[in-house]
Amino acid sequence: MSAVWIYFTLNETLVVVTEQETLEFPVMASKLFGQFAPAFWGMNILMIAATWILVAPKFVSDKPTRNPLLQTVTGLIATVISVILFFVLWLNLPALSDPAIQTGLLLAFILFFLFALLGVTKWMKTRLITSTVIASAFVLFGMWLERWNILMPTLTHARLMPYTTYTPTITEIAVTVSTFGILTLMFVVFYKFFPSISIWEVEEGRALEQGSGD
């Protein structure tokens, strides 16, 4: 599913560029390196990280290794540096506005982001449940950002009116928060009528039934 999602995201960008959809250029530019770039690239980073967390540990050996790139400490340090670089690029400070500096920061971010993924791979392999929860959180926030990128850049670059900015109203914020509350309520009601049973309890019950039958 992540591979399909990456294909659609890439295809959306390529269609606008290759077909020279000039009316779409302002929207695409705002997502690639404009006002909505942090949300767009944050979405891509979260989805790539989620894919890596779920897939890469399967190809790592269980044997201990001295490779510094596969050490948890390396991954944590690289994660901190990549987060700092991401926010530096996001803030677009005037002192760092030179294109050469921006390119260097972007390349450094990509490099440390890869180091971060490599460093946590070994740690994720020994913690399947934790890694799955982290990947699920990345997918959740990544997909929320995708919906944001579908709506906001287009609404703020509408063809029938001049460029404008968007600030959510109190009503919109309340509706967004209420959706999380409704979802939580649905889960609570569902588990009220259909209690969850752990797998080991089911297996234990089957074992007892087989033992009594014997």
Image (cartoon, grey):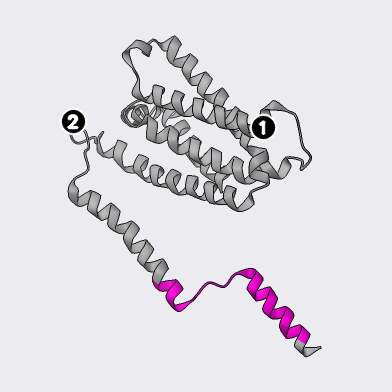
- Gap in Å between the C-alphas at discs 2 and 1? 52 Å
**Numbered badge on residue 71:** 1
142 or 65: nearer the viewer: 65
Identify the element where label 2 is drawn: loop
Q: Amino acid at mark 1?
A: Gln
**Numbered badge on residue 42:** none
Residue 43 sits above or below residue 94 on the image: below
Q: Are marks 2 and 1 in contact (CB under 8 Å)?
A: no
Q: Is residue 202 magenta?
A: yes
47 or 192: nearer the viewer: 192
**Numbered badge on residue 162:** 2
From this viewpoint, is residue 11 visible? no
The boundaries of the magenta stretch are: 189-211
**Could you tell me which residue is drawn at 39 percent across and 42 percent down?**
145
Viewed as shown, does residue 83 lie left or right of 114? left
Q: Residue 150: which quarter of the image? A: top left
Q: Main secondary structure of the magenta part?
A: helix
Q: Is residue 122 magenta?
A: no
**Could you tell me which residue is drawn at 61 percent across and 46 percent down?**
54
163 or 210: nearer the viewer: 210
Identify the element where label 1 is drawn: loop
Q: In the image, which is nearer the foreground, mark 2 or mark 1?
A: 1
